[in-house]
Image (tube, helix red, strand yellow):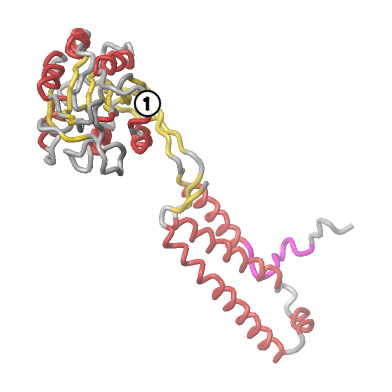
């Protein structure tokens, strides 16, 4: 795969046929001027040092230089670039609730979509951290292991939905346990967990596990999604029908703010309620910035590698060759016939 950083400059290729047409016109005009003096054979005998082949070769070299120049300014890129990058950050595990209750629409457009937006913002603001991604409902799974390539986490955003976890429910305790096990054994860097959930814990042991995590030096933060008044749960993303219980009553899902606060308090972290302002995220960001960071050397991959130096060197060599070729034969080497017996 290849691409151009500045494809608008490729329109310069439109000028190349006109350059060629001008060259043909000038050659025809030159031949007419020569015919006024005499035949072409006669002129060659009169000017034995003149070489028409060299003239043609010089033109095509200049033409090639123009092509390379256009590719140069257009920024030809291809291949993969790998470079070592030094970052200074923390280890961060983000656990996203994907239970059916996250489809409730008391937060526009729905809780899960809002959670994805917040996840994207966290990733953008924590570029120097090592990040792992976990999804949980009735069970918890590692969606992306701990990595310093934080932008890779964005590749998973579109795929996050309730179908990722076949067992429904909300087991926050398992998510915290899995998050704790996802960290490295490095004790020189601080670690934190961010739970994005409506905090409807179906096991009821999340506060104890959050306390265990805090005792191990891992801060547990909670971002509460939803409203305390609650909202019905749609049967699907585009459905106007809502889930009902065994008695036919519409199920209403509410943000369990008290549980969310207790989990954050037990985990010695921060609870923030997701809203339409930036206040909650700014508070969480400020809390994470207090943690101890560590310098980490990692490999960063770029899908496209800039080929400017290669094309520039080729262009320079082509121009040097063009300058070294004269229209006339070199008097010193004109009698040398390498391939003549």
Few, some or many residues within 10 Å of mark 1 (<14, 14–19, 20+): some
Most foreground residue, 128 or 198: 198
Compared with 278, 251 (above or below) is above
Q: Does residue 316 show up magenta in the picture?
A: no
Taking the image as shown, residue 186 lies to the left or right of residue 21, namely left
Residue 62 appears in which quarter of the rendering?
Answer: bottom right
Q: Quadrant of residue 40?
A: bottom right
Q: Is residue 334 magenta?
A: yes
Q: Which residues are magenta?
A: 325-335
Quadrant assignment, res 329: bottom right
Q: Residue at x 19, y 35 (%)?
A: 232
Whether residue 26 is visible, yes or no, is yes
Identity of the residue furthest to the bottom in this view: 36
Expressed as whole percent of the image width and height from the top left, the position of residue 72 reads 47, 56
| Residue pictured at 10% horizontal, 21% vertical | 258
Q: Quadrant of the C terminus?
A: bottom right
Residue 332, horizontal then vertical, whole percent: 72, 62
Along the line of sight, the residue nearer the viewer: 38 or 137: 137
Element class at badge 1: strand
Task: Give how far across and how far down residue 118 sits, in percent.
Answer: 22, 35
């Amino acid at each position: 795969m290849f691409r151009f950083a500045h494809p608008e400059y490729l329109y310069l290729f439109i000028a190349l046929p006109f350059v060629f047409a001008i060259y043909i016109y000038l050659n025809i005009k030159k031949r007419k001027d020569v015919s006024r003096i005499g035949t072409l054979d006669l002129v060659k005998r009169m000017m034995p040092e003149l070489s028409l082949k060299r003239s043609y070769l010089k033109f095509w070299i200049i033409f090639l230089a123009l092509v390379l120049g256009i590719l140069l300014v257009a920024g030809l890129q291809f291949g993969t670039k790998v470079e070592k990058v030094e970052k200074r950050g923390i280890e961060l595990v983000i656990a996203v609730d994907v239970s059916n209750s996250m489809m409730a629409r008391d937060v526009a457009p729905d809780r899960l979509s809002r959670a994805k937006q917040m996840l994207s913002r966290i990733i953008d603001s924590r570029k120097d951290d090592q990040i792992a991604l976990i999804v949980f409902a009735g069970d918890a799974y590692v969606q992306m292991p701990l990595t310093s390539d934080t932008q890779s986490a964005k590749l998973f955003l579109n795929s996050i939905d309730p179908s990722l976890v076949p067992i429904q429910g909300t087991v926050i305790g398992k998510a915290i346990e899995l998050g704790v096990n996802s960290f490295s054994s490095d004790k020189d860097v601080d670690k934190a967990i961010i739970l994005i959930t409506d905090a409807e814990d179906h096991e009821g042991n999340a506060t104890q596990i959050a306390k265990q995590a805090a005792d191990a030096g891992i801060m547990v933060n909670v971002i509460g999604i939803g409203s305390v008044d609650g909202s019905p749960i749609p049967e699907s993303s585009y459905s106007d029908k809502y889930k009902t219980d065994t008695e036919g009553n519409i199920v209403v899902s509410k943000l369990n703010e008290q549980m969310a606060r207790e989990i954050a308090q037990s985990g010695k972290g921060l609870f923030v309620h997701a809203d339409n302002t930036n206040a909650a995220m700014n508070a969480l960001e400020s809390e994470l910035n207090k943690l101890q960071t560590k310098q980490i050397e990692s490999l960063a991959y770029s899908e496209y590698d800039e080929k400017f130096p290669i094309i520039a060197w080729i262009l320079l060599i082509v121009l040097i060759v063009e300058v070294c070729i004269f229209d006339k034969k070199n008097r010193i080497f004109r009698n040398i016939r390498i391939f003549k017996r």
